Image (cartoon, rainbow, N blue to C red):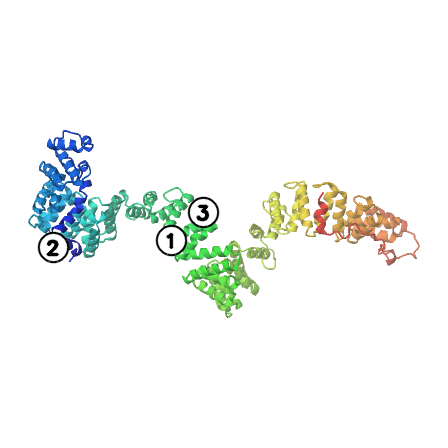
Amino acid sequence: MIFMISLDRLIHWLKTSGAGQITRYLCISAASLLTLSSWSQEPPIPQTISVSDEEMATATPAQLEAWANEGQSKAQFSLGLAYYNGTVVEQDMEKAAQWFQLAAEAGHPNAQYNLGVLHVQGQGVDKDFRKAAKWFRAAADQGETTSQYNMGIFHLNGLGVPADPAESLRYFSLAAAQGDTRSQFQLGVAIARGEGIAQNFPEAYLWINLAAKKGHQEAMSALNELLGLMTPEDLFAGRLLNAERGDADDQFEVAMAYHGGHGVDSSQEKSIQWLKASAEQDQPEAQLKLGQAYASGQGVDQDFALAAHWYQKTAEQGHRQAQFYLGNMYEIGKGVEQNLSVAMDWFRKAAEAGILEAQFKMGSACASGKGVEVDMKEAQAWFELAAGRGDVRSQFNLALLLESTATDETQWKDAFHWYEKASERGDARSHFRLARLYADGKGVATNQTKASEHFLIAAEKGDPRAQAEAGMRCLEGVGVDKDPGKGLVLLEQAAEREDPMALYNLATLQEKQDRPEQREQTLLYYTRAAELGVLPAQIKLIDLYSDDSWNPPKTHELLKWTHAAAEQGNLSSQYNLAMMHLGQDALVTHPDPQPEEAARWLRMAASQGSVPSMIMLANLLLDNSGPALDPSEAAEWFLKASKSGNLTAQFNLGVLHESGLGVEQDWVKAAKWYDHAANQGHAEAQWNLALLYEQGKGVPQSDAMALKWFERSAEQGLADACLALATFYLEGNLVAQNKRTAEYWLQKAIDGGCEQALEPLEALKQIQKGTDSTESKSSTEPSDATQPIDSIDPTPLDAETSSSDAEEILSP
């Protein structure tokens, strides 16, 4: 039978253990006599009081006795307490009983109760349950709760009164209604067993639950036993009774019963009503559920602001799930103004309370700097916590973090470990990353077979990157038997999922096959890959749209993909885009040419080491009509380009030092830069260096050295050098005079566009008319005897100075 352990044991104890045991049991109440029933805590009673409570509280025993002798029941009660406690007077149980008797007879309820206790204990009076019952009844009739409880026990067990279950229940009911926990328990037990009253599980639940909530241990056990006996309908009815009394917890339970149709017909409307009632009393689970209802619009109109309101209410009570939900609302700005910082504060609370999803969120936030400062150590700590609890996403992210920061084999092994853990849970991304580690031999010995195995597993799970990689491995037979058919299928699957590299690889395969009927599809693959940011695809499109034999050039497509590749840092595309803006590209002129944009792209490419871009940018900075005339910056770019041995840069540095443009004029440095370029075959540098030797600027004056560099420059076809060399032969300066040779170089100068050579050549021809026909044939080709002599070869200026000296030469 139910409750045998609690009630039956108590009854047996009371009936068989003798008066001593009963006294000991009731002494539990009596022990609190000195505090619970002291005069300052008793309820007010209707009697004439001639002294104030304050006077009573500070009265001496003599004063109390005087008042007591005057018939003051309160003084009599207080004096009885004094004798019982032995605090301000010597303890004397008989006197305590006498004074309690006087007060009790005057109707003092606490004195009546205490006198009843003394009769149970046999202290100061005879042990007498009938007298005890008399005084307990008197106090109980005045509403004294413990006396009501004791009368319930007395009538239940026939102690000093006839056993009367109905009367026992009446007294338990009176005390229970005043909140007496023991009475609530006893009443609930009786109703549950149907003793003295009709059995009623719902009502029994009401009273036992009340006692259990106050910590009554036997009630807690009894409640669990009762719940096991109740039908869903009984349980709902019991909880409804308690909910109607205002119990917040059972209001929540009633709401959930209506929501799920447990023990009652489902009613979302009533569910929400009870949720609101419970939530208004700060029941955290009710507040959470009400917030969820408003967030989902289930049973109420969807209202994210109200959802956030109720989440906030319960989150502030420490409810970790509500803290997480509230963090989500602040993160996305639903129901509240978006605030990532506040979101992370709530996520942190939820994470610290053990919400797995919140721990993952905190790891992600610390890694990305979303709402918090970037802190990779903290990110790793959160991921480790969640990963250790089996969260696959955290395992993957932890591995990814470890891989991205790995500097030694131990870290690579840790990354491998967590990828392996996540892959065991079926995470496709982790299979893909494991495959890469096996392929590269990081954190594990290189094993192409294992790599292909994991690529194929990830591919089967639908990872497009893995499909693309596995496809190429099947085509090439890397770590797996060569299977072109399967490889092509995998690539096509990945391409359908818009994997960039699959699209690019399919395009490359088709281009190699060079089938005219596939060209359109090939172009589509390249185009889609390029749109997804594959730089090689963008560059390939530039090549294809520039190739007449493959596809008619399309200006807008060339411009589009050149710009796209330039944005990704491709140096040649950045240079070509600049040329388009300057109108100097062979195929495309930009529809909106902007020299400023040209300079921006050139500077971008130059900063990444593009020598042609350095030269073009320097030239643009020297152009008076350009976007930003800046000879000093131009000199800096020429200097950077010169360090790579670029002849144009070296020559232009000579020009700048000669002219003093952008740098301080320095003939010596000009000569040295010309010499660098001249010795590497730069015709203009050779010409300028010859002029400096001729004029003795920056170098010692030397016609012989001038002749040498004029000759070197002329041999490369520089018209001015041809004219100067012809002059040497006409005048016989440092070389034997030879008009035929002079005529040859004059003609070369004219062919090179030098109009100044026309008049000397015509004059020379006139002079030569009528000469002896036995002289050389009219051919202008000089004979071996009249070729420029090579014996004149003084040591050139710092001939061994290399481009590595460039910076030192240019510096002041």
Q: Specify whether 402 is left or right of 811.
A: left
Q: Earlier in the sequence, mark 3 or mark 2?
A: 2
Query: Residue 16 bears which disc, if any?
Result: 2
Q: Amino acid at mark 3?
A: Lys
Vertical placement of residue 650 versus 99, above or below:
below
Query: Which residue corresponds to mark 1?
Result: 356
Kindly tell me whether residue 31 is visible in this rendering: yes
Q: Earlier in the sequence, mark 3 or mark 1?
A: 1
Query: Residue 665 bears which disc, if any?
Result: none
Residue 804 in percent (x, y) is at: 70, 51
Q: Nearer the viewer, mark 3 or mark 2?
A: 2
Q: Secondary structure at mark 1?
A: helix
Residue 436 in percent (x, y) is at: 50, 61
Q: Earlier in the sequence, mark 2 or mark 1?
A: 2
Residue 267 in percent (x, y) is at: 23, 49
Quadrant position of the C terminus in the picture: top right
Estimate how packed mark 3 is, as few (under 14), some (14 to 19) or many (20 or more) residues with alpha carbons within 10 Å. some
Q: Amino acid at mark 2?
A: Thr
- Between the residue at mark 3 and the residue at mark 1, the CA separation in whole angstroms equals 18 Å
Query: Residue 370 bears which disc, if any?
Result: 3
